[in-house]
């Protein structure tokens, strides 16, 4: 039996990167008189760097228009990132970032089944609170047994720190939980922590490689296109389907080696 379902946020719960963070970064650049804008495609490349502030610093390190001095770049990144997050929260509050298909249904199903859930993300806590309050109401946190964000896990995905903290809070072994992710960094973070991971592709990661994943598919909102195949009679990915994938997951078995004695 699965003892907990662990949710990534950006790209998994909602298309927050394209429709939230990117839009907010560009508005922040404009408001602060920063002389560049990010295209949808350019931002897709920058997603190889986890963390909004880190992403911005990386971009600046490759731009001639950016301040040459490292301390000035740090200060600018700080200012832009703070404003970006305020703008992002505004976008969320206006209702411009819907949950992805199948997410609300799976959240409710897990709550009804009393399956503990966790939020496992290395985005800033304010962004997570805004998104979940918008969709689940002001008492959103009662749906989750643990919420771990960048504030607690500064080593961002693909570092497994955020998953290890969530498992510790839930008092679970890694194999007792299942993670839902969309992007290579998140998949790697879960796998390095030993957590079985299923992958719902997102706008920026429509076909990311996911060797060893429990299941990979286009969306929690449909049953077609999943590997291994999902029940075609279902309209979406249900908790029962996840339980089935989990029960049939490939296990690593240790075969005792004959003739090798302890301590030899
Ligand atoms: C997603 C991220 C975040 C967001 C922006 O992490 O990398 O940086 O893009 O959020 P995860 P911040 O996959 O762990 O959800 O600006 O708050 O960093």
Image: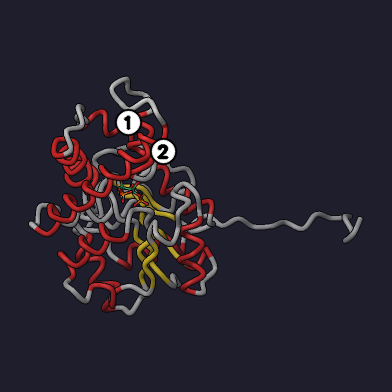
Assign the N terminus to one quadrant of the image.
Answer: bottom left
Q: Circle 1 sits on which residue?
A: 45
Q: Which residue occupies the extreme right position in the image? A: 264
Which callout, 1 or 2, points to the residue nearer the camera?
A: 1
Q: Secondary structure at mark 2?
A: loop
Q: Position of residue 51 (x, y in %)?
A: 36, 45
Task: From the viewer's side, name the closer residue of 193 and 55.
Answer: 55
Residue 166 tag number:
none
Task: From the viewer's side, name the closer residue of 13 and 21.
Answer: 21
Measured along the vertical axis of the image, is residue 238 above or below residue 50? below
Task: From the viewer's side, name the closer residue of 82 and 98.
Answer: 82
Q: Which residue occupies the extreme top position in the image? A: 64
Label 2, residues with CA under 10 Å away: few <14, some 14-19, many ≥20:
few
Q: Secondary structure at mark 1?
A: helix
Q: Measure the C-alpha gap from mark 1 to mark 2.
A: 16 Å
Q: Earlier in the sequence, mark 1 or mark 2?
A: 1
Left or right: residue 98 compared with residue 247 = left
Measured along the vertical axis of the image, is residue 115 above or below residue 204? below
Locate residue 94: give its quadrant. Answer: bottom left
Locate residue 18: give its quadrant. Answer: top left
Q: Circle 2 sits on which residue?
A: 209
Image point 36% across, 75% down: which residue? 115
Q: Position of residue 56 (x, y in %)?
A: 32, 37
Assign the C terminus to one quadrant of the image.
Answer: bottom right
Measured along the vertical axis of the image, is residue 30 above or below residue 101? above
Image point 20% across, 62% down: which residue? 130
Q: Position of residue 98 (x, y in %)?
A: 14, 55
Image point 22% across, 31% down: which residue? 38
Q: Position of residue 25 (x, y in %)?
A: 21, 40
């Amino acid at each position: 039996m699965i003892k907990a379902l662990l949710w990534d946020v950006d790209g998994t719960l909602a298309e927050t990167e394209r429709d939230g963070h990117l839009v907010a970064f560009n508005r922040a650049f404009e408001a602060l008189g920063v002389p560049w804008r990010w295209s949808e495609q350019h931002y897709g490349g920058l997603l190889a760097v986890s963390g909004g502030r880190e992403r911005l610093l990386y971009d600046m390190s490759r731009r001639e228009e950016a301040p040459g001095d490292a301390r000035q770049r740090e200060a600018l990144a700080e200012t832009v990132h703070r404003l970006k997050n305020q703008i992002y929260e505004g976008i969320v509050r206006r209702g411009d970032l819907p949950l992805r298909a199948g997410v609300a249904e799976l959240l409710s199903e897990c709550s009804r089944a009393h399956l503990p859930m966790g939020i496992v993300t290395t985005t800033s806590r304010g962004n997570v609170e805004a998104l979940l309050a918008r969709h689940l109401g002001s008492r959103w946190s009662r749906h989750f047994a643990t919420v771990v964000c960048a504030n607690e896990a500064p080593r961002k995905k693909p570092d497994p720190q955020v998953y290890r903290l969530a498992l510790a809070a839930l008092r679970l072994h890694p194999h007792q939980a299942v993670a839902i992710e969309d992007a290579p960094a998140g998949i790697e973070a879960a796998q390095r922590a030993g957590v079985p991971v299923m992958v719902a592709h997102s706008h920026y990661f429509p076909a990311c490689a996911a060797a060893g994943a429990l299941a990979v598919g286009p969306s929690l909102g449909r049953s077609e296109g999943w590997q291994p195949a999902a029940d075609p009679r279902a309209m979406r990915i249900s908790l029962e389907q996840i339980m089935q994938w989990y029960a049939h997951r490939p296990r690593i078995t240790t075969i005792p080696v004959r003739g090798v004695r302890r301590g030899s």
